[in-house]
Image (cartoon, rainbow, N blue to C red):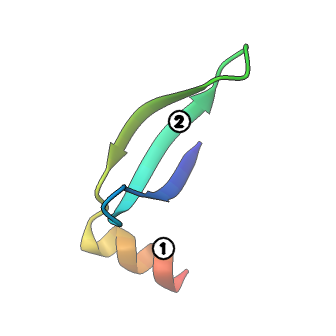
Amino acid sequence: MVTLGMSNKGRLLVVVWFETSDDSIAIITAFKPSAKQIKGYTHG
């Protein structure tokens, strides 16, 4: 799954994660989106 999130400093993050068989969440990566990605997320 890919989700938009916020850091504890209020920065936008793209978070890639999956749910494990025991209902835990494993985060693969989290990164600051590029300007192009931000535009795509905010303008559909």
Q: Residue furthest top?
A: 22
Q: Quadrant of the N terminus?
A: top right
Could you tell which of marks 2 and 1 lies nearer the N-terminus?
2
Asked if the residue under mark 1 is in contact with the one under mark 2, i.e. CB atoms within 8 Å, the reply is: no
The local crowd at label 1, few if under 14, some if 14 to 19, many if 20 or more residues have their Cα within 10 Å, is few
Which residue sits furthest bottom? Answer: 43
Q: Describe residue 22's horizontal placement relative to residue 27 as left or right.
A: right
Helix, strand or loop for disc 2: strand
Left or right for 29, reference 1: left
Tell me residue 16's x, y (percent): 47, 41
Q: Is residue 10 left or right of residue 2?
A: left
Residue 13 drawn at (x, y percent): 38, 57
Query: Disc 1 residue type?
Result: Tyr
Q: Which residue is mark 1?
A: 41
Q: Residue at x 36, y 44 (%)?
A: 30
Please determine whether, in this image, residue 30 is positioned above or below residue 39: above
Discs 2/1, front = 2
User: Residue 20's x, y, as percent?
Assistant: 66, 19
Q: Which residue is mark 2?
A: 17
Q: Residue at x 31, y 73 (%)?
A: 36
Q: Nearer the viewer, residue 18 or 44?
A: 18
Under mark 2, the amino acid is Trp
Q: Judge whether 20 appears above or below 39 on screen.
A: above
Residue drawn at x 53%, y 35% as measured from the top left? 17
Q: CA distance from mark 2 to mark 1?
A: 18 Å
